Image (cartoon, coloured by chain):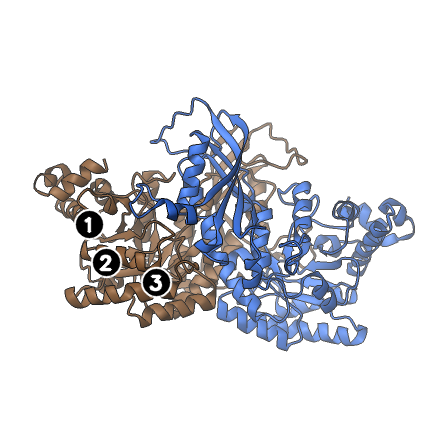
Chain colours: A brown, B blue
Amino acid sequence: MSDRIHAHYFVETPYDLEHATQVMAGEQSSGTFTRLASETDALREAHGARVESIQHLEVVDHPSLPLRADLAPTARHGYQRALVELSWSLVNFGPSLPNLVSTVAGNLFELKEFSGLRLLDLELPPAFADAYPGPRFGTAGTRRLSGVGQGPLIGTIVKPSVGLTPAQTAEMVCQLLDGGIDFIKDDELQANGPHSPLKARVDAIMPLVNAHAERTGKKVMYAFNISGDIDEMREHHDYVVAAGGTCVMVAINSIGLAGVTHLRRHCQVALHGHRAGWGLYSRSPHIGIGFAAYHKLWRLAGVDHIHVNGLRNKFSEADDSVIASARACQVPLFGASAPDYTVMPVFSSGQSATQVADTHAALGNSDLIYCCGGGIMAHPGGIADGVASLRQAWEAAAAGIAPEVYSRDHIELAQAMETFR
Amino acid sequence: MSDRIHAHYFVETPYDLEHATQVMAGEQSSGTFTRLASETDALREAHGARVESIQHLEVVDHPSLPLRADLAPTARHGYQRALVELSWSLVNFGPSLPNLVSTVAGNLFELKEFSGLRLLDLELPPAFADAYPGPRFGTAGTRRLSGVGQGPLIGTIVKPSVGLTPAQTAEMVCQLLDGGIDFIKDDELQANGPHSPLKARVDAIMPLVNAHAERTGKKVMYAFNISGDIDEMREHHDYVVAAGGTCVMVAINSIGLAGVTHLRRHCQVALHGHRAGWGLYSRSPHIGIGFAAYHKLWRLAGVDHIHVNGLRNKFSEADDSVIASARACQVPLFGASAPDYTVMPVFSSGQSATQVADTHAALGNSDLIYCCGGGIMAHPGGIADGVASLRQAWEAAAAGIAPEVYSRDHIELAQAMETFR
């Protein structure tokens, strides 16, 4: 791998494609609207962004994103789509995540030359591995902390999302612990609101988790949502750790890269990354950031888990996109030249036993967290049967047995397949 | 103002609009895909998001954002557009910026029910003013620090964006100081790269700024781009302050809300907010976050300046949007019940003397930073004449004199109007 940063884009432009791509490269390196005397050829060679490749795609009749009316470009040839690869010397900004983002996902989104511009993927030199330690726990560490040696962590989200008092939350946690759950998380809307302060929630929940661990030898992982300001997150992290907790969660987009990076350096437990707001990056094919690029930033920042939705979810994401995202989390970030920075993909959103066979088949392994809300709570047999149905579904999948077959002598799975189909 | 958070959205849906809006409210408060026993009516009343209003707009034939193919909603009635207002009780998450964002701009962007969903504006209760001090300097403080009592701060960006050594940058700064500039900023691509480390840049530049201040009594404001990780930003801020600097700059989207909020609490000088990446939020009319909502987050986080592009800029933003953004920065955030949290809008991108009259006419005041790159550097008379042309243009505008008239006995302005027209 070179010592350059490579970024891949989808673009669409009514202008000459070569010209538009040069504008893009110029804006994100040496450019201004008038070339200055001080912008020498040597400087451009050393610091200018390089257009590595342009792959023409189709021409469309209408601009995907609105162009400025007053520019009225001569679009009589239509709007050319293309895949473009740019590269930058690391010397421009060094291995710095925020400055990487300003460069590969900064002003270029605003360029008047484009009616579509989307960052698809990133390739980063190993210098980033030296600068950012990445996930402290990842898959192996999460298995160690949670005592789940194989299969997915069967998880759930405390629901309703908001409104339960700490005591009510603890009551639900109690049922979940008894039901054999591996992983519980706060909702991303539930952090430190007046009706359920984080510390009160920790005080109510951790004694239950600890007592259950003493009884069973397995410490269920509870991801406390500590999203907040920096000092608040550090304080809450410390509080969770002191209480014997093994995981904290943050809404990564709401906190931002600098905050998550900072928290990681302080963090002694698994860092659960919730991507609330992801739709802003993903919903339009014509603007935004693809998961292939996006998740690398957060892996470097140091989350151990990241959400990827799930098959047949309640959101707008298609199944192939979900699986591509989950797979990406398990691919080493720098090849063999550094730690692998793999993170556990977190499946959630409308999940139940019914999607397990397809999920396992598509992903090819069980190194994931599989979160169900209603898929556990609304099981006709109750929470324990809901958890059991999921474990049975994953056992069947790992053994290559169809869920319909496995259901014959696994009543919890049978009920789940019937209830949630 | 109530003690609730209000958020305004543009939406588009092939589903029944009332239903889709309830899904949106449910997802961002108490919802899961199966209603649970613990989700009582009382809990929903206290914690559920409330649909305050729905205003039907047009129906369109095609979805603006792709919907999942496997959902195949019956869209025979087309895609209904609407303006929707939701509100939340502050008790759900308290006055916390990250958790506000997770709530008003979180999962809802991903909902399958919508082929368009954009956050347009936010109204926040004064509890946020108690939690976040906001801009430390704002307009008055920036004028005090820079010694510019009236008119805009005439500013420039060091260009080329990257590639100059600290010594070369200092050489350019020297010319700019001699030319009578008020404000200089690093490019957003230039922070702490190996070829121009922040400290080396401070060491090269601040002695010049300080010497110039001793000579003239006016300390030119230099916005050092300290974007980076948290500890790095704190250290670099301290270094700038120790060297006598009066401003630091960060790329706010690249850092994130928690990082900027944290920096503000530590920051002793003006905090210049660059919005690189803004196109990701703004380019599509169908997904994203409008400036009216967006800038309020950063004002609360505590930036003193925020970028708004400029008239006839080199980007895709239309002039009316630029002016609406600039005006928004000057409107008090909480009415009369708190400090006004006003920030200085920063005009930049392809700016020169030619846009000044229109800018002043549209904004109605000169409480802004007016940044020109080529518009100063490429003036035929050189930097000093470039700066003079801008000051003349603003003098003319404030006096209600057309630039063509004022040009008759102001040669620098005349040349600028000719060069940059």
The chain holding disc 1 is A
Q: Are marks 1 and 2 on the same chain?
A: yes
Q: Position of residue A375 (x, y in %)?
A: 25, 44
Alpha carbon separation for disc pair 2 and 3? 13 Å
Vertical placement of B37 versus A124: above or below?
Answer: above
Pinpoint residue A50: horizontal percent, then vertical percent. 52, 51
- Dividing the image into 4 quarters, which one contains the C terminus of chain B? top right
Q: Is residue B351 left or right of residue B276?
A: right
Q: Quadrant of residue B183?
A: bottom right
- Indicate the amino acid at tag 3: Arg
Q: Name the mark nearer the viewer: 1 or 3.
A: 3
Mark number displayed over residue A201: 3
Dot 2: within a 10 Å radius of its alpha carbon, few (fewer than 14), some, or many (20 or more) residues? some
In primary-sequence order, the first of circles 1 and 2 is: 2
Q: Work out how far the residue at label 1 is from the one at label 3, CA to CA, in angstroms.
A: 23 Å
**Residue A212 lies in quadrant:** bottom left
- Three-letter residue code for mark 2: Cys
Q: Nearer the viewer, residue A191 or B213?
A: A191
Chain for mark 3?
A: A
Badge 1 and badge 3 in a common chain: yes
Observer-nearest of B92 and B247: B92
Few, some or many residues within 10 Å of mark 3 (<14, 14–19, 20+): many
Residue occupying the far front of the picture: B42
Task: Look at mark 1 in the image and give the residue it sits on.
Answer: A387
The secondary element bearing badge 2 is classed as helix
Q: Which residue is mark 2?
A: A174
Amino acid type assigned to the residue bearing label 1 in the image: Val
**Position of residue A242 measured from the top left corner of the image (x, y, whole percent):** 32, 72
Disc 1 packing (10 Å; few <14; some 14–19; many ≥20):
many
Label 1–label 3 contact, CB within 8 A: no
Between residue A337 and residue B185, name the one nearer to us: B185
Residue B3, position in %: x, y? Answer: 53, 53
